[in-house]
Amino acid sequence: MGTYKQVIVAAGVALTLALTGCTSTRNEGAAEQGAATQPAGSGGLPAIASPQEVIAKSLGAMRGKKVQMITISGDGAALTRAWKERTVLGFREVGVDFTAINANFDTQVLAQQVQTAIDQKPDALILHNADLSGLAKLIQQAQSAGIYVIVLNLGSNAQSDAYIGPNWTAMVGKLAERAAADCKAMNKKDVAIISGFASDTGSLLTVESATQVFKDQGMNLVASQPGQYDPTKANEITRTLLQQHPGLCALIGNWDGMMSGAANAVAQAGKIGQVGVYTTDSSDVACDGIAKGTVAAAVNYGGGTTMGDDAVAVTQYLLQSGVTPGASRTALFTPTQIIDKSNYQLAGSCYAAAAQ
């Protein structure tokens, strides 16, 4: 996929946090002397420090810290591989002891892995959640144990120290509007939704947002089914829908790895150009589909390009901040862009991650 080179964009929001968050109080005596000191345990950088001191103090605060990333998706997913590539690089350069494991789409294994990690007491956990409530108690347990928790992409009811991911409602809304416009151009109305696990943030908000947009646009929603983030399952669902609803014009789903199965079903039925497949994420899987015409549009939300870097930047901030885990919670929303035939070959539109 030479055309779809991974382009890493600076994590602007996260970097702003890191720069603004690294401040602390100084006693009056130190202020009068202009010394670059701060009260013990206050965290962050002093108000005045030379560039050399900034480097030394920041790296000193992070060196030897332990961070573990645990994802629900496996190494077969380009998204997971991209996160791993960027986090390994980012943490290695600042001396953090970093490890990454995955549950390969098994929710029970995910919970077990997180519990084991908490028992090992790392300084921070980066989690890719499977549903709203599955890890909620474990997230709270980790924070109570003094562990920072950063959640990527799929949020939890228990709020972590930071969430990094898209505004699913707005992102899917834009994609559904595009699908509806394409259907109207063909004088068709039948549309369908294929979600992931159904109970995860991405699936819940995809169904909610797409359903509302389709209603507002006068579309006829003929089906909404969970595909379990499985391309084989999505393929089966699509083949059935194509048989039951010959007027179907659009299928929308919330992960390109899963929706590749839907795209293959459309191609196998000889309906390329008649039934559009629309998906979030823009790995080379989606962009290959766009090139072939089996995928009408995808959304780049920074999943494989910036999110790993964002996770490193936010974790660095937390490790230096001195903030008590669980005491401060924030959400950082990544920018989104519709990718289609007009722009999929542009740098940064799509990403590829090396096989592991």
Image: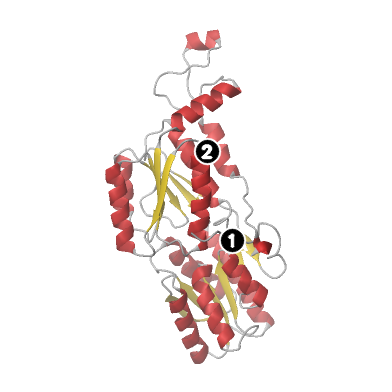
Q: CA distance from mark 2 to mark 1?
A: 22 Å
Residue at (63%, 83%) from the top-left corner?
272
Which label number is shown at residue 93?
2
Which residue is under mark 1? 352
Q: Is residue 192 above or below residue 37?
A: below
Q: Residues within 10 Å of mark 2 (few under 14, many from 20)?
A: few
What amino acid is labelled 2 in the image? Glu
Q: Quadrant of the N terminus?
A: bottom right
Residue 187, by quadrant, is bottom right
Q: Residue 89 in the image: state x and y as whole percent.
A: 52, 45
Query: Vertically, is 253 above or below 46?
Result: below
> Image height check: is 20 above or below 177?
above
Q: Nearer the viewer, residue 145 or 156?
A: 145
Horizontal arrangement in the rendering, residue 196 relative to residue 287 (left or right): left
* 333 relative to 187 in the view: left or right: left
Picture coordinates of residue 329, whole percent (x, y): 43, 43
Task: Look at label 1 and name its amino acid.
Answer: Ala
Task: Identify which residue is drawn at 67% across, 69% down.
Answer: 340
| SS at mark 2 in the image | loop
Q: Secondary structure at mark 1?
A: loop
Q: Is residue 189 visible?
A: yes
Q: Camera-side residue: 111 or 135? A: 111
